[in-house]
Amino acid sequence: MTIRSFFVFLAAMSVSASVVAHEFEHQPGFPEVPAEWGTVGDGHGEIAVASNGEIYVSVMGGEQPGLQVYSAEGKYLRNVPGAPKDFHGFVIQQEDDGEFLYGVGLWSGTLTKMKLDGTVVFATPVTAIPEKYFWKKKDSDEINPRFTSCAVSPDGTIYVVDGYATDNIHLYDADGSYRETWVGRAEPYNFKNLHKIHIDPRYDEPRILGCDRANLRLVHLSLDGEFLGDFATDLRRPSAAAFHGPYVAIAEIHGRISVLDKDGNIDTTMGTNDDKYNGNRTPPEQWREGIVTSPHGIAFDADGNILMTEYSKFGRILKYTPTSQSGKTELIHDDILGSFRPAKGWMVADSVEAVAGESRFVAEAVEQGGSILFNGAEKNRAAYLFTEAEFQDVSIQLEFMVPKGSNAGVYVMGRYEIQILDSYGKPEVKHSDLGGVYQRWRSKEDAEAKGLPQGYEGVAPKVNAAKAPGEWQTMDIVFHAPRFDAEGKKTQNARFKTVHVNGQLVQTDVEVTGPTRAAPLRGEEATGPIAIQGDHGPIAIRSYVVTPLTAGSGG
């Protein structure tokens, strides 16, 4: 996926996806810092999330300075080999040939592009920029760069801000070559401590969002440098920003995290500290659970959690989790069939029981009421059951029951199947077992012509989590839809982020390049309904919760 395509899908997502939750709660005990460290270390840096969910944090001192990497759950994994120890700001960027990290050295003034394994692509020294754009130390000709942040536009242009010295914004080409400088303290900008800059993807044309800290405001600039105006004012010294759908989270170093909508209005706040803030020497014994001291860097993960790193000589990372999500809907309600498109063979009942040792149910359909949806007592030719609504990124929580030997499936967007099967007791499982990502299928002619098997790309579940037939079971799916550019060209494949069966993780980050075998809908689209397979065997459903999601990006 090109850098431009990455921003195209983020902009589209901000319009079509559901909103982020409006309430958050602090998650204590995050992250799991090795006991021998005591704390993370000098946190005068940034935080960002890679596509695999791993969390990157720049740390300037302590036991493990440099770029620390944590799992999504907060366990310390490693440091990035050879990463600079003065990254005040960095971003993680998905490009055609991989995922890269761009960072700027607070003291060195070096712009570095590297792979996530630490391999350096380029390192452009500060000497590439004319000296006239720098502040010099008193009674000295030595320049004193204080680079605080960088951002990368859809066309690959790199923007670097000298936020602790001149507030100038330096532009580089995609290969790291210096291009030009915008003078930050001149009209019309009048910046004063332009601490961090970010590419704001929420609009038809991406723009720059600047955290003009001492002026207590957020500003918008076009990618060509046109000053578009204030986005929000009277904030508590905004230090950094992160985007999630139509919202932006702001780390305010004067003791607060705020979430703003596209109009710059504050939607919610968290961690507010009105007593003692903006101090990097507050000792850990004076930290208060969930109350911030000096928010400095911020990111969203793909699930909408907020991650924040503080300006602290000891180092502190906090995590806030959404407590509610707009659009969460239970489809099994008083008018069950009203949630779905008309489908032959589907009925509702007050109770459904599996017949021991047989592939059938005992159930009596009812005209009114009923709390269980099912497709008949025995295997029949019931149609696929499609939701009335269509979805893009979505979370699905299903509570279902199948009798012995039965077979069904969940087709997300009507195209990508997670298998439902009576797999109880199998010592080995395949893609066709419960929780498997069902294989794709090529025609016999195509397979013979290419010398390839007809079935491909199926992924077996990590474990057999199936319960015995006749027991109620759960399936939880987190799915990210394929992305398309303005011309309709696919720029990113569909992906099952996680699948859990009966509470056990069975799939993680599985890419699906196209519709799986027997998908009721052909081709690929940006949105689609969810379908339950109804023609391979009996299935009963007593809970069916769908929640539209928004994908996040660190910054």
Image (spheres, rainbow, N blue to C red):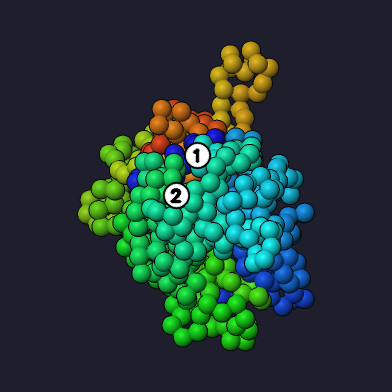
Is 310 in front, or is 132? Answer: 132
The kind of residue tagged 1 is Pro
Q: Position of residue 513 (x, y in %)?
A: 55, 33
**Badge 1, how many Cα within 10 Å: few under 14, some, many 20+?**
many
**Badge 2, how many Cα within 10 Å: few under 14, some, many 20+?**
many
Residue holding disc 2: 208
Q: Which residue lies furthest to the front in this view?
A: 139
Looking at the image, which residue is at 72% across and 78% down? 38
For the N terminus, the image quarter is top right
Is 348 in front, or is 442? Answer: 442
Circle 2 sits in a helix, a strand or a loop, which is it? Answer: strand
Is 188 in front, or is 217? Answer: 188
Q: Can residue 14 be seen in this view?
A: no
Circle 1 sits in a helix, a strand or a loop, which is it? Answer: loop
Q: In the displayed structure, does residue 1 sit left or right of residue 63? A: left
Residue holding disc 1: 154
